[in-house]
Amino acid sequence: MFLQEGPTTIGREDAPRMSDIVLRGPGIASEHCVLKYVDNSVHLLPHYQAQCSVNGVDVSEPVILTQGKSAVIQSVELQMPTPKS
């Protein structure tokens, strides 16, 4: 998945505003979280009471996803790539 500069919304198809990435399944909130790509950094911004974790730790506040970190949005895992040497 490639992110463009700015916010990418993640949620269900019945969200009040259309989500950029639609997920289905139990536990996915209509507006679940936002991935915000700014200045070569990806920020995960979970919405209120949406289940998100980074490297196995639940998060409820914005967090920067650095190389090698793994974010889980309900049961979907996003792996931040590590550059090849």
Image (tube, helix red, strand yellow):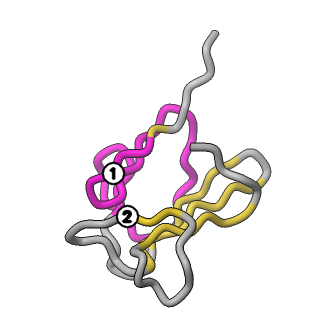
Query: Which residue is outermost to the front?
Result: 13
60 within the magenta span: yes
Q: Residues within 10 Å of mark 1 (few under 14, many from 20)?
A: few
Q: Are marks 2 and 1 in contact (CB under 8 Å)?
A: yes
**Which region shows up in magenta?**
52-78
Which residue lies under the disc numbered 1?
Answer: 76
Number of marks: 2
* Left or right, 26 with reference to 48: left
Name the residue rendered at 31%, 71% in the picture: 28
Query: Which residue is outermost to the bottom?
Result: 16
Report, in whole angstroms, how far the alpha carbon at label 2 lies from the one at label 1: 9 Å
Q: Which tag, 2 or 1, sits closer to the chain's start? A: 2
Return the residue nearer the eye: 55 or 13.
13
Judging from the image, what secondary structure is the residue with disc 2 in?
A: loop
Amino acid at dot 2? Leu
Q: Residues within 10 Å of mark 2 (few under 14, many from 20)?
A: some
Which residue lies under the disc numbered 2?
Answer: 23
For the N terminus, which image quadrant?
Answer: top right
